[in-house]
């Protein structure tokens, strides 16, 4: 099998204040949006959705009417644990790992990441950082400046040759901010492709309001 899609939906949504993957967005639960984007991209042969322990049946119920092989597996306490659970069972030579919290991902971005992963072994979508960055502490700015040139913000889906990512994730005992980190700490290069500013991550409740507006503009 060429590629597997893995959608991480096992987080607690603490900053959102509840289970954001079941929250309603444009008439569907947040989770279903990225599932549909993966089906529309037509580049993965299976989908694996990683669910929070105890939520497996609720997640499976959302997915039961899809005319596509979708497996639900149980995630763990840290993102890295959930990611590993998905990659362990994936059959594809390549895996595309996506945050369910990014429901507005488009089919074109999914294909772009897979193409780059096939060429380089590992690839992630990024956006240039446009704001000036500084550290703040106790209500005031610190004097240290961060050079902005070359700084990027990292999105998902992230694509990898499975045989590169699996040992790196297994060896990562610490929590990781994303899957690319597992390779980078081991000196394995990760390519970048242009991300999509609409592919926002739902972290706080107001992000859902913004996502609904973006969805309306997109028209479906
Ligand atoms: N995730 C996961 N397993 C975890 C932690 C996170 O599958 N143990 C997933 C989330 O479901 C989400 C994605 O990783 O789709 C990005 O994580 P984040 O936005 O931080 O979501 P949560 O961890 O759910 O939110 P919070 O950190 O506010 O609790
Ligand atoms: Mg989190």
Image: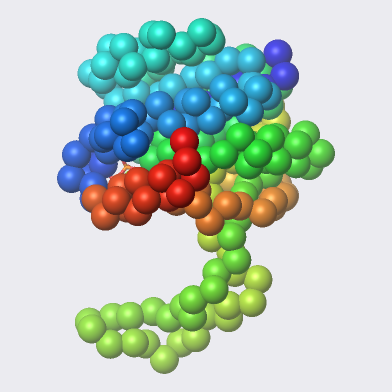
Give the side of residue 56 with respect to residue 34, left or right.
left
Is residue 172 at least partly visible in the picture?
no
Q: Which residue is depicted at the point 24% across and 50% down?
A: 205
Q: Relative to the observer, which residue lies in front, 220 or 158?
A: 220
* Quarter of the view holding residue 148: bottom right
Q: Which residue is depicted at the point 18% across and 45% down?
A: 17
Q: Which residue is depicted at the point 39% across and 14% down?
A: 63
Farthest bottom residue in view: 143
Locate residue 165, reporting x and y percent. 62, 33
Farthest left residue in view: 17
Locate residue 191, reporting x and y percent. 72, 50
Give the side of residue 171 with respect to residue 176, left or right.
right
Q: Relative to the observer, which residue lies in front, 136 or 201?
A: 201
Q: In the rendered view, how is the structure colored?
A: rainbow
The N terminus, quarter of image? top right
Give the side of residue 111 with respect to residue 18, left or right.
right
Give the side of residue 160 with respect to residue 73, left or right.
right
Is residue 111 at least partly visible in the picture?
yes
- From what the image shows, is residue 144 above or below residue 97? below
* Quarter of the view holding residue 161: top right
Q: Relative to the observer, which residue lies in front, 71 or 178?
A: 71
Total tally of numbered discs in the picture? 0
- From what the image shows, is residue 130 above or below residue 117? below
Q: Which residue is depicted at the point 65% across and 39% down?
A: 108
Locate residue 151, reporting x and y percent. 59, 69
């Amino acid at each position: 099998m060429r590629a597997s899609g893995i959608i991480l939906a096992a987080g607690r949504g603490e900053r959102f204040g509840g289970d954001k993957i079941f929250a309603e967005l444009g008439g569907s639960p947040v989770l279903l949006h990225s599932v549909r984007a993966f089906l529309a991209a037509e580049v993965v042969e299976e989908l694996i959705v990683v669910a929070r322990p105890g939520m497996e049946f609720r997640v499976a119920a959302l997915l039961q009417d899809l005319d596509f092989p979708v497996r639900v597996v149980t995630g763990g306490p840290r993102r890295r644990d959930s990611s590993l659970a998905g990659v362990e069972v994936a059959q594809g030579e390549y895996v595309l790992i996506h945050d369910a919290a990014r429901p507005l991902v488009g089919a074109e971005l999914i294909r772009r990441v897979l193409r780059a992963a096939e060429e380089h072994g590992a690839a992630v979508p990024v956006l240039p950082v446009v704001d000036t960055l500084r550290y703040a502490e106790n209500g005031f700015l610190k004097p240290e400046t961060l050079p902005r040139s070359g700084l990027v913000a990292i999105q998902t889906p992230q694509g990898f040759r499975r045989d590169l990512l699996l040992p790196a994730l297994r060896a990562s005992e610490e929590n990781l901010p994303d899957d690319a980190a597992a390779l980078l700490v081991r000196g394995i290069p990760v390519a970048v492709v242009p991300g999509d500013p609409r592919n926002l991550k739902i972290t706080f409740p107001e992000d859902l309001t913004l996502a609904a507006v973006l969805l309306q503009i997109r028209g479906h």
